[in-house]
Image: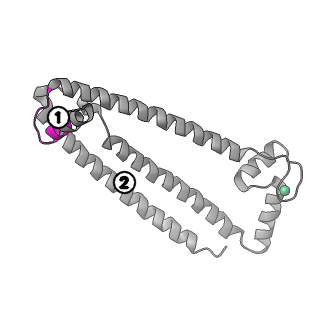
């Protein structure tokens, strides 16, 4: 048997409520720990890359892409990040909306879009949390051979609780998401 097979067998034993050989058991905890650390490093690297992408996107160009005016640091910078053009262009845009009597709709739509992206973030974080707990290696670490069954029982209870919690949270969030999307779709502009 190679290490991998041994690992698989030990896991099968645990799931069946049997006691794996202690040496393997300890070794398995090491493997889980190593896997967890690798996962953390990978996740951190991804976070850094994402942050860099955001910075790249958010860097304000010298000239407004709409009217070609040189952009000033404070006001234009802020407007560019929000609307991809300069402050003056935004003023013009909003005035036009007011004249056409569309400003209120546009403003409500903007608020709804913000809500939607917030809800999507929340859904993502619940899903991430569920995934993290899925592969949680913590139970393997402090377990003595005698405690295996007890821990297994506790573990499956946790699993159920986690599934139940995330299901409820996701259900609620998805409902809000649908409502916001429905409202958004009802706007003409
Ligand atoms: Zn402009």
Q: Residue furthest front?
A: 1
Disc on res. 151: 1
Q: Would the CB of label 2 be found within 8 Å of ligand 1?
A: no
Answer with mark 1 or mark 2, whichever residue precedes in sequence.
Answer: 1
Residue 37 appearing in the image? yes
| Segment colored magenta | 10-21
Comparing labels 1 and 2, the label whose residue is closer to the camera: 1
Q: Quadrant of ligand 1?
A: bottom right
Q: Quadrant of the C terminus?
A: bottom right
Pick the residue in front: 13 or 117. Answer: 13
Q: Answer few, some or many: residues within 10 Å of disc 1's Cα (few below 14, many 20 plus, some between 14 and 19).
A: some
Q: Find residue 156 and report its horizontal and vertical position in percent.
A: 20, 44
Q: Quadrant of residue 112?
A: bottom right
Q: Find residue 159 and report its horizontal and vertical position in percent.
A: 25, 45
Q: Say whether residue 151 is magenta.
A: no
Q: Find residue 72 and report its horizontal and vertical position in percent.
A: 85, 45
Q: Answer few, some or many: residues within 10 Å of disc 2's Cα (few below 14, many 20 plus, some between 14 and 19).
A: some
Q: Find residue 64 and report its horizontal and vertical position in percent.
A: 84, 53
The residue at 61%/40% (across/down) is 51
Q: Say whether residue 17 is magenta.
A: yes
Q: Are marks 1 and 2 in contact (CB under 8 Å)?
A: no
The residue at 53%/53% (across/down) is 118
Q: CA distance from mark 1 to mark 2?
A: 26 Å
Is residue 52 placed above or below 173 in the rendered structure?
A: above
The residue at 38%/59% (across/down) is 172
Q: Secondary structure at mark 1?
A: helix
- Left or right placement of residue 122 versus residue 56 in this view: left
Q: Secondary structure at mark 2?
A: helix
Q: Would the CB of label 1 be found within 8 Å of ligand 1?
A: no
List the residue tagged with mark 2: 169
Image coloring type: one colour
- Left or right placement of residue 125 versus residue 143 in this view: right
């Amino acid at each position: 048997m190679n290490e991998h097979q041994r690992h698989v067998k030990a896991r099968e034993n645990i799931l069946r409520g049997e006691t794996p050989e202690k040496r393997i058991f300890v070794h398995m905890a090491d493997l889980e720990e190593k896997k967890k650390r690798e996962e953390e490093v990978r996740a951190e690297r991804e976070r850094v890359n994402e942050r860099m992408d955001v910075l790249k996107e958010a860097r304000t160009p010298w000239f407004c892409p709409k009217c070609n005016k040189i952009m000033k640091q404070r006001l234009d910078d802020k407007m560019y990040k929000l609307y991809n053009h300069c402050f003056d262009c935004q003023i013009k845009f909003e005035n036009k909306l007011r004249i056409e009597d569309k400003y209120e709709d546009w403003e409500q739509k903007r608020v709804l879009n913000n809500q939607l992206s917030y809800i999507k973030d929340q859904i993502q974080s619940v899903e991430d949390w569920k995934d993290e707990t899925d592969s949680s290696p913590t139970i393997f670490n402090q377990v003595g051979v005698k405690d295996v069954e007890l821990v297994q029982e506790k573990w499956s209870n946790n699993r159920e609780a986690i599934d139940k919690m995330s299901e409820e949270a996701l259900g609620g969030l998805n409902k809000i998401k649908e409502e916001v999307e429905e409202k958004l779709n009802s706007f003409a502009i």
